[in-house]
Image (cartoon, grey):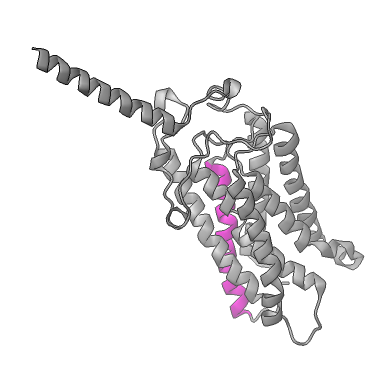
Amino acid sequence: MGYNIFRVLADFSHLASKGILIATIHKNKSAEGVSLLTQLLYAIVFISRYLDLLLPYTWSNHYNLLFKLTYIATSLYILFLQYRVFPRSRESETQWKLAGLILAFAVVTAPIFHAIFRDRAYSWSFLDLTRHFSWIVESVAVIPQLVLLAHTSVPTVINSYYLVALGSYRALYIPNWILRYFAADTHLEPAAVIFGVLQTALYIEFAWIYINRQRVKLRNGGGVLDGDEFARGLILGRLIKKEKMGERRVGGGWRGGVSVSADDFEVGGAQESDDDDELQRETDVEQGLIGRREGSSQA
């Protein structure tokens, strides 16, 4: 397998993104705004991609062994933090269905791409099939995170350091592919490049949505964000119907984590939705106008 400076930097950037996310969750004592579904999909990606760890002869490459084990361990640890330590999920039922569709799509299409791009010199391989499956899932695994960021009405613990590390990981793989192509690297997988390009496009969408979120002013000195201003992305904002998700929670009485606004606006489950607030404001305005008109008539 080809190694070059871009590949190595990309691997360490990816590893850094995992460490930054874990450190940020611990620092804030919250996993608010981090998509449980995206992290679950990432865990599935690494477990399915690195099933070759069950074969002892693959352990001879210590560099790969270290990164494979670390990716799996950190992904599972992030899930543990989200599910047990700071359990709060804002994904709606629709988002769970979306994650299910992503997995179903990968299961159906992985054999197709494997048949198209596999090396004819070798017979069918289950490990090659699961590797194609992992590329497909990873390419779109960030979608639940994008939807959550674009439509949630509470702040997120995701920061610019995590975004830069994650973006660098994908960006550095582009020159890595180019170098390997011109070096006639026989291990360069066309399917990995195709789905890698798709993943890079969605990471650009991720950055766009995050930057737009940072521009939104907080109401009342910090709290609920004005959702309509950041619900538009470059790609998904035109494909996915907008929906308010700030008040949605999955998992009953999950109360873990501390956020700027989560506990302030959900005490007792009696919080009114943004739509109700907007309706009330419109009613107040109408009543005010009627009152002024009646006063003018009496005068």
For the question of whether residue 295 can be seen, the reply is: yes
Residue at x 47% of width, y 31% of height: 273
Q: Residue furthest right?
A: 56
- Give the prevailing secondary structure in the magenta stretch: helix
- 274 with respect to 94 (left or right): left
Q: Quadrant of the N terminus?
A: bottom right
Above/below status of 63 relative to 269: below
State which quadrant residue 299 falls in: top left
Q: Nearer the viewer, residue 115 or 128?
A: 115
Task: Look at the image and say whether residue 163 sits in the magenta stretch.
Answer: yes
Q: Which residues are magenta?
A: 160-183
Task: Give how far across and how far down residue 48 sits, in percent.
Answer: 77, 61
Task: Give how far across and how far down residue 161 sits, in percent.
Answer: 56, 43
Q: Nearer the viewer, residue 264 or 208?
A: 264
- 189 with respect to 275 (left or right): right
Q: Nearer the viewer, residue 63 or 124?
A: 124
Residue at x 66% of width, y 44% of height: 36
